[in-house]
Amino acid sequence: MPSTVILWLRRDLRLDDNPALQAALHGCDTLLPVYVHDPDSDAPWAPGAASRWWLHGSLTSMDRALRTLGSRLLIARGESLAELRRIVAATGATRIHWNRLYDPTSRKRDGQIKQALRTDGLRVESHNASLLFEPWEIATGNGEPYRVFTAFWRRCAARLSEVPPLRAPAALPPPPDSLDALPLERLGLLPTIPWDAGMREAWTPGETAALEQARAFVHDRIQGYANERDLPAQAGTSALSPHLHFGEIGPRRILAMVREQWGDPSADPVEPFVREIGWREFAHHLIYHYPHTTDEPLDRRFAALPWREDDADRMLRAWQRGATGIPLVDAGMRQLWHTGWMHNRVRMVVASFLTKNLRLPWQAGARWFWDTLVDADLAANSLGWQWSAGCGADAAPYFRIFNPVLQGERFDKTGTYVRRWCPELARLPDKYIHQPWTAPSALLDHAGIRIGRDYPAPIVDLKASREAALAAYEVVKSAGR
Ligand SMILES: Cc1cc2nc3c(=O)[nH]c(=O)nc-3n(C[C@H](O)[C@H](O)[C@H](O)COP(=O)(O)OP(=O)(O)OC[C@H]3O[C@@H](n4cnc5c(N)ncnc54)[C@H](O)[C@@H]3O)c2cc1C
């Protein structure tokens, strides 16, 4: 009997190293690659505006890739289980494959769907496309999940040779002619008012661009990563994060590229970059084992931290808009708004500033990032925010508060990054670019800047707000006793 198989695509929008696709092809006569748009089932973490923009491009690219191999992407909209059942009923499919997701909402939904479809008589199989190792495969000697990155990664690093990628198929069985598919435009993923020009300029979503970018990075730039990764004015990092989030490339392929060109991925000069892929694994390990960390601190003592009560809305808005009066923070927030991405060093600075100097809850920052980042990823974002707020696994100690002026002077010495995103400060000399409010007034006049008119005065005093944060932290310390 001819076999019809559904490939349920989600955040694995690629042909290369796609285990669900490979498994679906075994003994398959008719393949149905399906994407179901079901944002309600992702609530409260339905993709934000920047992610939706990326998703549109990624689905377009996936459809194009499938068509070159004789197939196409079938788009549906609605409740996932109901849509999958509708497709099964219309096609007589007997099998379904998908690649796993690890965030709590998706896990719950996928578990229910698996059970329901099995009860219907379907063969259902899920696979691992997005991680080097499943979160349950890596455990401490006592069988516990890890909470410290170094020990976690030591265990993973010893096994990196075990995870070769799968090749993309050369051809695909055709989909049925008869099935109605929704045009992608009907999902309404693109903005109705065109605020996405900066993102279009900065990014090309899709597998082809992801593979090209990874190849170019591994070939030309990976050896400089250790020295350049902290300099936000330079393209010193891979910028692969949105491609990885949407599964346009997988970590096993990246590792294989590294190995092919440089040999052992755990050795210099490539180890510092490979270790960051390790942080991505760690983020997924944590969200799988500690699912509450999307909203609550892993270190529960921090639930007692007293956040700011006065003027909180105004402070949050100034931070979101890049109008805090602290140049490195504002530059980062404007880069985010304009391109949907922010350099990692600056993410740490703006997160420290929000949670410590402004004493606003990390969850408010995580939400803003969720809506504005093209790489918004629940695992990495929760880890990043909790790390910065000092309340997560293996976090920076709370009392280590970044000074955004010193961070700027160290990592953006000549102010190139700040000048790019805060052009109103461009004419200031390097000495004052990270603290314009300290510049002599004649110099400000000469540079055409009046603080408070052309660029805001700092919304908080860095020293006083630091001390207030440390005082608030005393509450946490006593909560732990
Ligand atoms: C407050 C805060 C929020 C963050 N939110 C996100 C997010 O929503 N999505 C996201 O992908 N990353 C997030 N990060 C982590 C990091 O900033 C980005 O992954 C990185 O800047 C992406 O740029 P890149 O691809 O050039 O990274 P590279 O330096 O080239 O690193 C390669 C890859 O490793 C992974 N990676 C690197 N650093 C981390 C990290 N600290 N945690 C987890 N994975 C990492 C990413 O997949 C990245 O693409 C956040 C960090 C902070 C401090």
Image: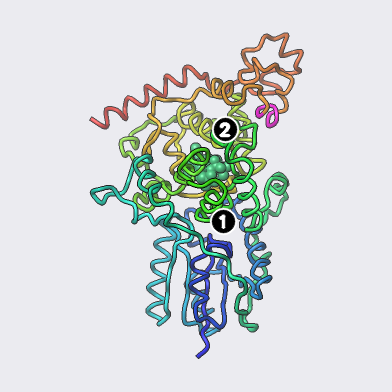
Task: State the predominant SS element of the stretch in magenta.
Answer: helix
Nearer the camera: disc 1 or disc 2: 1
Image quadrant holding the C terminus, namely top left
Tell me which residue sits at (53%, 60%) in the image: 11
In the rendered image, which residue does mark 1 sit on? 249
- Residue 248, position as x, y percentages in the image: 58, 57
Q: CA distance from mark 1 to mark 2?
A: 33 Å
- Name the spot of residue 440 as percent of width and height, x first: 67, 9
Instruction: Kindly identify which numbered label has been placed on residue 90.
Output: none
What amino acid is at disc 1?
A: Ile
Residue occupying the point 62% across, 22% down: 413
The residue range painted magenta reads 417-422
| Front position in the image: 266 or 329 | 266
The correct choice, above or below, for 263 with respect to 329 in the image is below
Q: Indicate whether 23 appears above or below 422.
A: below
Residue name at image x 52 percent, y 30 percent: 349
Quick check: 335 left or right of 166?
right
The quadrant in which residue 262 appears is top right
1 or 2: tag closer to the N-terminus: 1
Quadrant for residue 168, please give it: bottom right
Q: Is residue 225 magenta?
A: no
